[in-house]
Image (cartoon, helix red, strand yellow):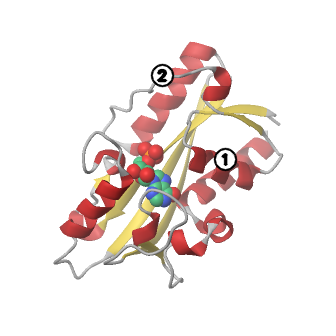
Amino acid sequence: MISKLVFATNNKHKLKEVIAILKDQVELLSLNDINCHIDIPETSQTLEGNAEQKADFIFQNYGLNCFADDTGLEVEALNGAPGVYSARYAGKDHDSEANMQKLLKSMEDKKNRKAKFRTIISLIINGKHYLFEGEIKGTIIKKKCGEGGFGYDPIFIPDGYDKTFAELGNDIKNNISHRALAIHKLCDFLLSQ
Ligand code: IMP
């Protein structure tokens, strides 16, 4: 079993979610922990490509076992947009509020509100590459609801619930989310090693 892994992110929300899911099974190091203060390029047109690019960067430059994730919100009525461009939907600033407002505007006249979050995790162990995927289907609501979570959470209601991710709280989100599903697959894989 691998005991130490770099998670190629400095997103505090993601780190908290993943630490809560992995518990003490694996010691996680963030980019800060390994003194990596570079904004790692994400220039691919797919989630898989971006996740691999980030993990590769760490393995090539630091020689450490690591994983990286990339997540997109795929909206049916927008032909899968914002998808891989979710972080930059409203511009380069990665401004979640602006991204949500742009999405709500694009959806104003749409009856079909179906969407899904999809996460891809790229793992590199001793130079070998592995991919894990998690997705959750749901609905885009018309107005923001809830204060928790991050990103598009206040406008996404997962199927089977009547509250947004931002209202449901971390315990529920960490059980059912796209990232939780992908992390559980990663964890099962690590345990099988
Ligand atoms: P990335 O994976 O950090 O590149 O995220 C892409 C975009 O999706 C960013 O705008 C994030 O804020 C958003 N995002 C990623 N994960 C989640 C989530 O769990 N809930 C809501 N938005 C998310």
Tell me the quadrant of the picture where the C terminus can be found: top right
Q: Is residue 10 above or below residue 114?
A: above
Any mark on residue 186, and which? 1
* Residue 179 location (% of width, % of height): 57, 55
* Residue 99 location (% of width, % of height): 31, 56
Q: Is residue 185 above or below residue 32?
A: below
- Does the image show residue 124? no
Badge 2 element: loop
* Kind of residue sitting beneath label 2: Ile
* Kind of residue sitting beneath label 1: Leu
Q: Is residue 104 above or below residue 16?
A: below
Depth order, front residue of 84/17 = 17
Residue under label 2: 38
10 Å neighbourhood of mark 2: few (<14), some, or many (≥20)? few
* Residue 4 location (% of width, % of height): 77, 31
User: Going by the image, does 10 lie left or right of 34?
Assistant: left
